[in-house]
Image (cartoon, rainbow, N blue to C red):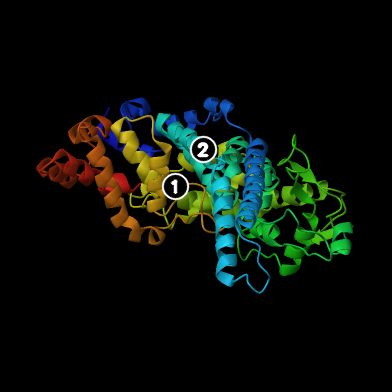
Amino acid sequence: MSNSAKAEAVLALHRFGMGPRPGSIAAVGSDPRGALIAELDRPLALAAADGLPNSAKAYRTVADANARRAARAKQAQQQARKQQTAATPAMSEDQIQAPTQNQEKDAAEKAAKQAADAVPDPGRPIYLQEAKLRMEAALAAEIGFAERLVWFWSNHFCISANKIQSMSGAYEREAVRAHALGRFVDLLLAAEGHPAMLFYLDNLNSMGANSIAGINRSAGLNENIAREIMELHTLGVRTGYTQDDVISFANVLTGWTLVPPGADPQHGGEFVFNPRLHEPGGQTVLGKRYEQEDDEQGRAVLRDLAAHPATATHVATKLARHFVADEPPPILIEQIAKRFRDTEGDLKQVAVAMVSSDEAWRGPPTKLKRPTEWGIGMIRATGITVIDPGRYAAGLELLGEALWRPSAPKGYPDDEASWIDGIGRRLDVANNFAERISGTVDPQVIIEDVFASEIAPEVKQAVGRAETRQQALALLFMSSDFQRR
């Protein structure tokens, strides 16, 4: 393999994949673009996920645990009060003093907390199991282009585990992974109709003013999901929709909710359309009238948003910015958008158009990787294929990109300015990781075998002059060859 072919293979692995791992440069060979495209034909499903609960089951499991926790706390509190009453001599109301009352209250609250804490929280283990599968899939991938696309779309249609931890991993598997290489409209419908998204964007109790529930309960409309779908998931900002469009679309989506777990132990947590919440009658969105009944009205609007020209441009811009550069070439954006429009949102063909464009390969590897990408690339280079999900999740949190926990519905940013201040924390993580693996991992092997010596000369020199193997590994992990794509 020529030096130029090796350099392009390394660029392919960094820019579009998860980073080089032992043997990956040779596997990519002399046709990196063809190798990237070939990876899109491999299945994305996670076979090991068969043992994990689906999102509704996970939601019910946590809801059931919370209900048991509340019941036991209440029982313990009542028992503590009975014991306090039995142990306290009979006194008149005038004799009962505030300190005694406070002691009884504190004792009851302590007993309630101890009883509640005795019920294990199933949400965290489910979250960590999902995280383990996700990261091990990224470590096992030959290139990781398809996995990167899953990560991209999961961030595009993000939810937050801070709000709905039980469903966070299953949501990605069910709504995103299942459609990441399919049609955008199917991905859009799956994401917006998923109970996790409806929960995250507060649509569960959104009701039209003229709906049965709206009239009886005098409750209101929630515009969150309608606004985020238009602004973040499809059209993008400043693309012609108005506040009236948002309100109309929010009315269209009233009734999109989930089955309460307490009401149905078999189907709790699943999507359901509740006509009692739905605003009756037609709605006008972006100048088009929608007269459909039930949830088909919302699906019709989503299908039209998926086909809107602004959506093609918005998606193309985000893809190019994520994979190629903070300021991607306009011609690359147009090439991706054109393929999106021409194929009616065939996401596999959109990905092919991106990696087939010369514009996607011309720029030097100057784009700063996000913490998740840098972290997984660092681990891949060592040949490690199994991780401790708790340790990895803690590392991501330290670096500011906690897994499935963005601070806002727009997801984690893709520009350097948002991440450059965290370089110091990356050094802490790199040092810690280097210390743990220095006994078994040789930095020279990574340079020569994993990177095929396609490392900057000054990095090779710095690594060679390091006083310890730990220091050499940390220097290597913190180099531009690892940090940028």
Picture quadrant of residue 450: top left
Residue drawn at x 14%, y 46% is 462
Residue drawn at x 28%, y 41% is 433
**How far from the left and from the top, in percent, is residue 166?**
59, 43
**Looking at the figure, which quarter contains the N terminus?**
top left
> Viewer-proximal residue, 70 or 92?
92
Q: Is residue 166 above or below residue 278?
A: above
Residue drawn at x 41%, y 53% is 325
Report the mark closest to the observer, 1 or 2. Answer: 2
Tag 1: residue type? Phe
Q: Is residue 353 visible?
A: no
Classify 10 Å Cα crowding around label 1: few (below 14), some (14-19), many (20 and above).
Answer: many
Q: Is residue 66 above or below residue 43?
A: below
Residue drawn at x 56%, y 39% is 122
Relative to 197, 380 lies left or right: left
Tag shown at residue 125: 2
Which element carries disc 2, helix, strand or loop?
A: helix
Disc 1 or 2, which lies upstream in sequence?
Answer: 2
Relative to 305, 165 lies left or right: left
Separation (CA) of disc 1 from disc 2: 32 Å
Tell me, yes or no, whether the two marked residues, 1 and 2, touch with CB atoms within 8 Å: no
**How far from the left and from the top, in percent, is residue 104?**
58, 60
> Viewer-proximal residue, 359 or 261?
261
Residue under label 1, please give it: 323
Residue projecting furthest to the front = 90
Tag 2: residue type? Pro
